[in-house]
Amino acid sequence: MATRRSSRIQDKRISSNKLATQDESDDSNIEVVQARPVRKAKRAKTVGTTKQVVTNANPEVFRRTRGKHGLLEKLAKEAPLDIYLEVFKHLEPRDILHLSRTNKDFRNFLMASSSLSIWREARENVSDLPPLPIDLNEPQYASLLFGNNCYACLRSPCDNVIWECRVRCHKSCMSQLFINYNRIENRPARLNDSDLRNVIAHAPFYFGQIGKNRGRFWFIPMFERLFAKYKEIQRDQSAVRKWNEEKGRRFKLITNHVRQCLIWERKRRAGQERLRKERRQEVIERLSASGWGVEELNHNEFFLHSLLKISKPITERMWSSLEPQLVDLLQTLKDRRLKEERRRSLKSRYELLELAYEEKTCGDGLTVYPPISDFILDANIGVIDDMIWNTPHDQKLTRSDFIDALRSAGAEIAEFSRIWVEQQSQGLTKLMRRHGFKGDYDLGSTIFACVHCGDRTWTPRIFMHRCSTLNIWNNQRRWDRPEFNPLSELSCGWWRAAAFAPDVVASTKLKEIMALCGTVEAERIEDLEREDPLFECLGCKGGQSGKRCFARWMEALMHSLEGDKVVLAILDDDTKSRILALEQGHGRYCPNYVVCKHCPPDKTVFELHSSTDKLWSHLRIEHGIDHVKVKRNVDWCYGLREPVFTFRPRAVTLVG
């Protein structure tokens, strides 16, 4: 017969009480009793948790990417501690140090006192590493050994370690962390020099030079700690004696450990350098097999590249990522080398062109040639341009090649020179107008003064004046070939009309001199140079009776500018011969270059220094002209390059 519901509830209560009594009295039978598993209550989902789950499962950055992502993060957060400990056994202190700086979780874990065994095992993985010193803990020791930041400025890299003071510091930052004995200030009144020497006797020091001072230097925080401790016990002699003994033993241990660190550092650096050399050699062998030449592989930028400074052997997996970077670098070096070789080749060719052009222009002293810069910019001589730019840069050219090219392009150069003179003459005419020249003044009868040297000149000599190409950086002309700009490499600039200023007073006096010529037709300065009339200065006799002063037109112009009265000289043949003889005696002091008027243009120049003996010998031997009958501007003249106004024939004086 079935029992009633109230009876069944009462029986359950009785059985529960019996089980509880049995559990308290006898623990040996606890495995017999099997309690029902308690079912956990479902956690209510919230909006925040739902979003978090979705975000962690499939972040936005990976929303359209195939495969699973975030597994490494999940491993780092959910892996058991035993796995971490097993991994850490195979790491070195450098790795542990870097891990402790990745996030707060690793830092709190690795900096805890329970993790000292991890640091100890990591230190044992480094061969010949000195033991832990008495004044540092494991993280501090690892940071000193394998850190890469300066303790003062926190910048990296920093390889300068002062082992005695347990400091890694740049040499430029040492003045911030170290102090010299002579600079220790603010000493207490009761702390005399002997006490101070007792303090620093137990403080490790650095011996060397910091800034302009040389000697012993102490690490400021270390010194301040010793200083503060000594201040506490300086009145107690027994405590001071005990403190000195303890610090003395400690100082010896630190000194001994420093020696071990120095030995280990030397071995470590030697091993690292050996690994770097092996790595560099293997990289060079691999790249040489790929076809790269010694020009790039021996380049200093490649040799000192950061990828070759790593002291690790190269694996195939590492090489697959290393090779593309090195190949890009080598290609850059190769392109730069070829560009530099091309630039040097072009520079050499333009220098040879400049020498050949100078030889050509100096060999023809009576022809106007534009400066080399104007020639390069505007001449556009096809054969020369082709020689410079289209000849392979490894093919060597000589000055003779350019001399021959200039000779073959003589007609083109002459036509360019004619057009160039016309263009520059227009610039000089505009310059005259700006200075107020009007009326019957023209370019052929105007004297200009150089703004640089002050010498007076005129056309066509003005186009060959040396000062006309100065101040090349003030010009705005541009070169249209970016590969190489010869204008920045050559020694001269282009011709500028602004280098001259019209001389109004001298030009006015020149008009008066021309008017005195009478029957001699002289409308241009070229006519005066050709005819070379003789003038008499009436103001030079002074009080010396019986003396007469005669001068050619340039000297007569100077006398006129000084206020003397000048007239055209009318003389008999005997007087002219006497004047000519005196002029030839004075004429032995000439410019460096004079021109024979009887020779072809390419054989006209004679280089003279302090005498005209070569010219007289040439005229006598080659042309049968005796030196007594030689006439200036008829048998010889000054070249267009020479400052003739400075070397003008001086006045001669006749007595009686």
Image: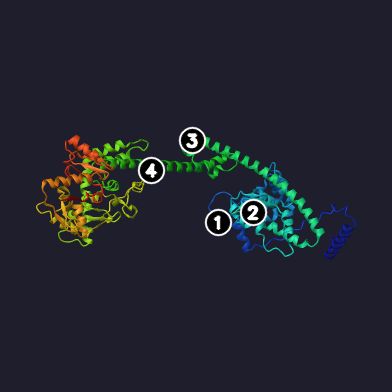
The alpha-carbon separation of the residues under discs 1 and 4 comes to 53 Å
Residue nearest the viewer, comparing 431 with 530: 530
Where residue 351 appears, x then y in whole percent?
A: 34, 42
Disc 3 marks which residue? Answer: 290
Do tag 3 and tag 2 residues touch (Cβ < 8 Å)? no
Q: Between residue 418 and residue 86, name the one nearer to us.
A: 418
Residue at disc 3, secondary structure: loop
User: Residue at 14% across / 56% down in the picture?
Assistant: 567
Where does the image place residue 643, in percent across and percent down from the top left? 26, 49
Residue on which the image places disc 4: 343
Q: Amino acid at mark 1?
A: Glu
Tell me if 491 is positioned left or right of 655 in this view: right
Q: To which residue does mark 2 refer?
A: 101
Q: Please tell me which of labels 1 and 4 falls first in the chain.
A: 1
Q: Amino acid at mark 4?
A: Arg
Q: Is residue 302 left or right of residue 533?
A: right
Question: In the image, 549: left or right of 378?
Answer: left
Mark 3 or 4, nearer chain start? 3
Report, in whole angstroms, how far the alpha carbon at label 4 lies from the one at label 2. 50 Å
Residue 60 tag number: 1
Q: Position of residue 651 (x, y in %)?
A: 20, 51
- As drawn, the residue found furthest toward the left would be 519
Residue 366 in view here: no
> Which amino acid type is shown beneath numbered disc 2?
Arg
**Viewer-nearest of labels 1 and 4?**
4
